Image: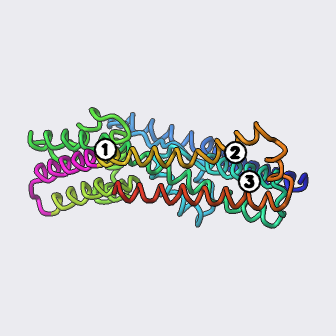
Amino acid sequence: MSDQITLVFVGATVLLGVALLRVLRTERRRTRLEPQLTAITTVATRADRPVVSLRRPLQPRRALPALLGARLDPALAATGNRIGLPHLFASGIIAAATIGFTAALMQLRPALAITFGGFATLGAPALLLQVAQSRYQREFLEVFPDALDLIVRAVRAGLPAPEAIGFATREVRPPVGAEFQRMLDEMRIGVEMEDVLQHAADRVRVPDFRFFVVSLLLQRQTGGGIAETLSNLSIIIRQRKALRLKARALTAEATTSAAVVAAMPLIAGVGLFLINRNLMSILFVDPRGRFMLGLAIASLLLGIAVMKTLIKKTMH
């Protein structure tokens, strides 16, 4: 049992050291770039031109190898850069430590403990990334209809689309306002509008925002009106939000029932442990008891996953 715990914590320490090394390398890179960024800003000021800051927060992910960085860059950008490489490493380390402690408590075989620990170490960062992306997309859709309404009013007042986006940037709160500001900054330094919109669509990963990008590109190529299209898009997003809230209300009873059913085995187990510890200790001491306990936990997790899937399908 002690060997398993030692193995898990040694692995966690190594992973933590790698994460800290990446962070330190990124900080050194930031220090090297500071004089160059200052010189660029100074030149722009002397030329009496609008100062456009080229500074961007350098994420630790920039120090990754090219192949892994190419995969993680878009995924981390889809979270609004709210999490970075240290968060992913920390989640993997915590998951590995949890599995190691559980394996030591249940006295699992080292090969089985290492297998579960490997899956947890890889699965926890992926789950954290997915949750962060979903949260960012929900927050984006909360504000996006208001931004569309402002753009529609500005376009109907005679402003071109880029200036309308700039108007929405000043009035709309993040994350939509921050994303629009980033788009404007890219256009001001000479990036083509088509590329700016495509980069934004790749970062946000929201279908409604991608439709907004396609509408702007078509309007730029054909010269047609865009106000009516964006107005209809805003209405559709609001209607879909209302429908999701209605579905959530209809499935609230099923969600509560699922939570109660999932909590009953835990409550019963704690109650039996308090009443008769010798009886419950068989599940931790005897190999057959540990096998039954592991099977019960797996069955409970499978049942929770099935109930969650059914509720999610009902909402969609």
Contact, mark 2 vs mark 3 (Cβ under 8 Å): no
- Dot 3 corresponds to which residue? 99
Q: Does the magenta stretch include residue 27?
A: no
Q: Which residue is drawn at 9% across and 58% down?
A: 224
How far separated are the C-alphas under marks 2 and 3? 20 Å
- Dot 2 corresponds to which residue? 269
Give the camera-side residue of 135 and 147. Answer: 135
Q: Would you place residue 53 above or below residue 312 in this image?
A: above
Circle nearer the viewer, 2 or 3: 2
In this picture, residue 209 sits left or right of residue 277:
left
Q: Residue 96 carries which label?
A: none
**Residue 302 in view (yes/no):** yes
| Majority secondary structure of magenta residues | helix
- Dot 1 corresponds to which residue? 245
Where disc 1 sits, the SS reads helix
Q: Where is residue 234 in the image (x, y as percent from the top left)?
A: 20, 47
- Amino acid on which the number 2 mark rests in the picture: Gly
- Amino acid on which the number 3 mark rests in the picture: Ile
Q: Which residue extends farthest right? A: 2
How far separated are the C-alphas under marks 1 and 3? 36 Å
Give the camera-side residue of 7 and 168. Answer: 7
First to last magenta residue range:
222-243
Q: Would you place residue 217 above or below residue 45 in this image?
A: below
How far separated are the C-alphas under marks 2 and 1? 36 Å
Q: Where is residue 165 in the image (x, y as percent from the top left)?
A: 24, 43
